[in-house]
């Protein structure tokens, strides 16, 4: 579980709830009609904007916000130095055993292409096409949540207008003014909360996850192409180290 995401959720909602409780009873901020207008309207508008299959895909992508196993770039580089050394010593076919012992599906596929005898240019084309399609799917998930972040404040304003209309139509009955005004104000509140504390931050996190995963896969691609060319492990390491920040570039051969 991602600690930063979890801490952000608790701190954002916790501080809002704490601030509310200091000034009044938090129960007055709970209004089911207001929530139904904002949440139902946001989901409905988003489903009009995107096909159902894309909406369902975004739900599956949501788990990447909280649950994402970190991948160590340094360990991947160490593995590829071992792969390159084995390939130079025993031939490219000797990597078949390494493929079976690898848990990373992308590494398995990329190494298998090399073992199967594809030339470096073909490997580059296949892997970069796959990376581009993965990136496109990730961008779709982030885009859907950003769209929801755009719709929810607008639905909040629609709820405010509904509440104001109800309030103006019942001015002769003072007992109905309060509930109508609550709907008017709380829909705007819910829309702002959903947009700024859930939908937009989730979209940003998904984009960040996509960037991290894309960089790892591009680094793996560079390593596999280097192996397929039969390059020295030292050269392979330098090609893969450029994907890391300068302060993390520690060479095994230095």
Image: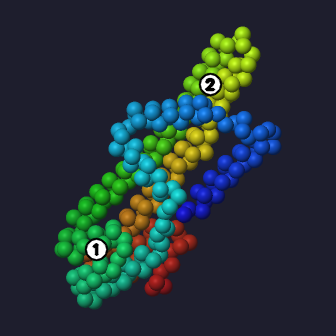
Q: Residue furthest right?
A: 23
Residue 94, image x and y in percent? 25, 85
Element under label 1? helix
Q: Are marks 1 and 2 in contact (CB under 8 Å)?
A: no
Residue 242, image x and y in percent? 45, 69
Does 191 appear above or below 225?
Answer: above
Q: Is residue 207 left or right of residue 228?
A: right
Q: N-terminal of the two: label 1 or label 2?
A: 1
Q: Is residue 232 left or right of residue 92?
A: right
Q: Is residue 240 left or right of residue 109?
A: right
Q: Residues within 10 Å of mark 1 (few under 14, many from 20)?
A: many
Q: Nearer the viewer, residue 85 or 172?
A: 172
Does 1 appear above or below 33?
Answer: below
**Residue that appears at 51% across and 56% down:** 65
Residue 31, image x and y in percent? 64, 33
Residue 99, image x and y in percent? 29, 78
**Residue that appears at 44% across and 36% down:** 46
Q: Which residue is mark 2?
A: 160
Q: Which residue is mark 1?
A: 111
């Amino acid at each position: 579980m991602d600690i930063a995401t979890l801490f952000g959720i608790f701190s954002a909602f916790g501080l809002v709830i704490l601030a509310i409780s200091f000034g009044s009873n938090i129960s007055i901020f709970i209004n089911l009609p207001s929530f139904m207008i904002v949440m139902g309207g946001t989901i409905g508008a988003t489903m009009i904007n995107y096909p159902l299959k894309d909406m369902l895909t975004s739900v599956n992508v949501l788990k990447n916000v909280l649950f994402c196993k970190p991948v160590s770039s340094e360990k991947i580089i160490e593995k590829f130095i071992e792969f390159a050394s084995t390939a130079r010593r025993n031939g490219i076919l000797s990597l078949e055993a390494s493929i079976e012992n690898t848990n990373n599906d992308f590494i398995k596929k990329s190494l298998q292409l090399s073992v199967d005898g594809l030339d470096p240019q073909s490997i580059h084309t296949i892997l970069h096409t796959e990376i581009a399609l993965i990136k496109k799917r990730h961008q779709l998930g982030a885009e859907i949540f950003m769209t929801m972040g755009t719709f929810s404040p607008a639905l909040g304003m629609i709820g405010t207008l509904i509440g104001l209309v109800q309030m103006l139509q019942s001015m002769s009955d003072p007992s109905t003014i309060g509930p109508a005004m609550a709907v008017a104000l709380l829909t705007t509140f819910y829309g702002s909360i959903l947009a700024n504390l859930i939908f937009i931050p989730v979209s940003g996190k998904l984009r960040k996850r996509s960037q991290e995963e894309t960089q790892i896969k591009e680094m793996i691609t560079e390593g596999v192409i280097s192996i397929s060319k039969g390059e020295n492990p030292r050269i392979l390491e330098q090609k893969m180290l450029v994907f890391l920040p300068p302060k993390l570039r520690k060479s095994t051969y230095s």
